[in-house]
């Protein structure tokens, strides 16, 4: 007597186990994909940040290369030195040559202000040397975002680096520093510095 053929198939337990394994593999694949995408995003952000820093350093270096020993009337009854810092917070103010010689500014000299705003942005503002901040806002460019601090150090004739310019208690007045070191600290903890030698001093 022959027994009927038994139908072959998956039991309920096998189906549940298979679905469980599939779910685990799907989660692992999703996590791996998330890691790759996050790494890719960080890489793009880092490259973009490096590009902005490179552009900012290029502008800063070009400005400092063309410093001129020319004072500036701020239009508020005060004459600023050719190069000076703000003692209360980060700020650089100096006269820069090498600009286009226009009818409104035949000397090609401009006044440059570097400062940090309340949004942690490094700003560069420029005026023609004949202009006045009292009546003209100047041209402002945002160089870098998310800046924690900017430190400017200046080499005095005595061979000492000081953040203040002109140096406090200097033995004699010096119009321009002999060397300038700029350090930029970002909010993400990154720090970058440049030294600009060869600034002509009086």
Image (tube, rainbow, N blue to C red):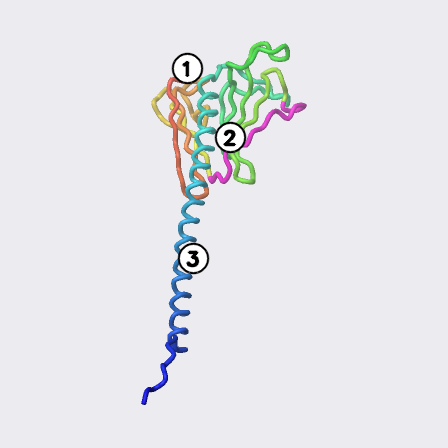
Q: Secondary structure at mark 2?
A: strand
- Image disc number at residue 200: 1
Residue at (41%, 18%) from the top-left corner? 199
Residue 97 rendering spot, x and y as whole percentages:
51, 15
Identify the secondary structure beneath mark 1. loop
What label does residue 91 carry, if any? 2
Q: Earlier in the sequence, mark 2 or mark 3?
A: 3
Q: Nearer the viewer, residue 137 or 21?
A: 21
- Badge 1 local density, few (<14 within 10 Å), some, or many (20+)? some
- Image quadrant where residue 108 sits: top right
Q: CA distance from mark 3 to mark 1?
A: 60 Å
Q: Nearer the viewer, mark 2 or mark 3?
A: 3
Q: Quadrant of the N terminus?
A: bottom left
The quarter of the picture where the C terminus appears is top left
| Chain part drawn in magenta | 133-148
Above or below, 26 against 33 in this view is below
Residue drawn 42% across the image and 29% down it: 182
- The residue positioned 39% from the left and 34% from the top of the image is 192
């Amino acid at each position: 007597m022959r027994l009927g053929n038994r139908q072959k198939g998956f039991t309920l337990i096998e189906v549940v186990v298979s679905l469980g394994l599939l779910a685990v593999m799907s989660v692992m694949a999703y996590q791996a994909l998330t890691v790759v995408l996050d790494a890719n995003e960080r890489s793009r952000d880092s490259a973009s940040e490096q590009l902005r820093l490179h552009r900012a350093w290029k502008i800063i270096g070009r400005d400092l290369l063309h410093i001129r020993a020319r004072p500036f009337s701020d239009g508020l009854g005060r004459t600023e030195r050719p190069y000076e810092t703000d003692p209360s917070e980060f700020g650089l103010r100096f006269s820069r040559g090498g600009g286009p010689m226009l009818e409104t500014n035949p000397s090609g000299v401009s006044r440059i202000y570097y400062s940090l705003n309340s949004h942690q942005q490094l700003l560069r503002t420029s005026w023609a040397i004949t202009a006045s901040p009292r009546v003209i806002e100047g041209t402002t460019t945002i160089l870098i975002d998310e800046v924690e601090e900017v430190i400017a150090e200046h080499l005095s004739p005595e061979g000492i680096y000081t953040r203040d310019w002109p140096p406090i208690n200097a033995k004699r007045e010096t119009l321009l520093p002999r060397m300038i070191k700029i350090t930029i600290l970002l909010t993400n903890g990154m720090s970058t510095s440049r030294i600009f030698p060869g600034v002509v001093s009086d």
